[in-house]
Image: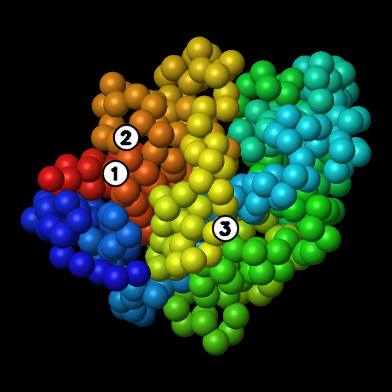
Amino acid sequence: MEQVRAETVGLSSGRLARIEAAVKRRMDRGELAGAISLVARKGKVAYFQCQGYADLEAKRQLAPDAILRMYSMSKPVTSAALLMLLEEGYFQLDDPVSAFIPEFAQCKVLTELTDSGPVLAELERPVSIRHLFTHTAGICYPNAEGSPAEKALALEAKDVSRMEDLTLEEVVGRLVRAPLAHQPGAGWTYGLSIDVLGRIVELISGKPFDVFLKERMFGPLHMVDTDFYVPPHKRGRLARVYGPGKSGGLELVEWATNAFWEKPRFLSGGGGLVSTAADYLRFAQMLVNGGELDGAQVLGRRTVRLMASCHIPQLMDQPAMKEGRAFGLGYTFGLGGRVFVDEAAGLHGSEGAYSWSGMASTTFWVDTKEELIGMFLPQLIPGPAGLHEQFQTLVYQALV
């Protein structure tokens, strides 16, 4: 995508320079090894800055074409993929998941986890495809030290650390044997729901999930470096992952750094993609454009609008939502990502802006009203509080 002087697209280059200064301050404090910051408006790149290192130990600079672990920034991509099949008439949002994965009709809901095992209740309503898109199905992530539902799923998943040794079909097969955290639609629980969407893509299309993505999205959008792994000839571009050191500064997060070197059996639509700033920008620009980029119509304009609409009105009065403990103050949830609704929360943004983040502290948003895209891409686990909000403020204050 063409890079232009910021002023030609209604941004101040002087004000955008504050991003570089803010990132440098965090690097000087030992909070960041490096980060890519990107701002695009009206289909042009107005700011693209690489700071710091992809490899601290080797002093390898972070390059514009660095390959990054997107983790949960995979979720909007997977959501868009299944919405292509919605547009082809294969399902409706409120159809039961059991129409494609019959085992979902037998799901139970966890009411209590006792020493003698889980206490379960019957479903009050079917798990729907909309529930999966919005993380309201009650499906969590496995965590042996977490909530009762997370512990129950961890018991079912057995060796959670080796989930990548399972296929997507096998992961979903174990998932449906574990109880849901709550009745479908009754709460917001972050977990493997979007991975189930990837499995539905496979079942409808008759193709492996990665093949579908390459043929229907990555190919048409020319996302040439986006995949579920990094092939050998590209590994020199893969950034390393860092986290807070026990005695200050940063240290290598080895389990994350060593991931994505081989094609996994588990094609995780919820957290399995690697990509570059340029590739993910093309996906984001497609959303800003109403589903089209450079002649490739990936989604319809109204479908993109559907993604960025509130799909959980029944939950917005819950304390977790009002206090921002679910997915951030000032937001509701759409299909596969959150949607900005309230500047009174103290954040800059336009109503309807769509965004999501990843475990390595990556984040992006698309603001169709301002024709604006923001992307902040470090490789940091976990990230310091306020990192994304700071970047968002620094982008919006540059609008003129």
| Residue 322, image quadrant | top left
**Disc 3 from disc 1: Cα separation:** 21 Å
Q: Residue at 73% x, 36% y: name it.
A: 92
Residue pointed to by mark 1: 370
Is there CB contact under 8 Å for labels 2 and 1?
Answer: yes
Query: In the current view of this chain or complex, which residue is farthest to the bottom?
Result: 233
Q: Earlier in the sequence, mark 3 or mark 1?
A: 3
Q: Position of residue 308 (x, y in %)?
A: 49, 37
Q: Amino acid at mark 2?
A: Ser
Q: Nearer the viewer, mark 2 or mark 3?
A: 3
Residue pointed to by mark 3: 298
In the picture, measured across the screen, residue 246 lies left or right of residue 89, that is left
Q: Nearer the viewer, mark 2 or mark 1?
A: 1
Q: Earlier in the sequence, mark 2 or mark 1?
A: 2
Q: Residues within 10 Å of mark 2 (few under 14, many from 20)?
A: some
| SS of the residue under disc 1 | loop
Q: Position of residue 94 (x, y in %)?
A: 73, 29
Residue pointed to by mark 2: 350
Q: Nearer the viewer, residue 394 or 163?
A: 394
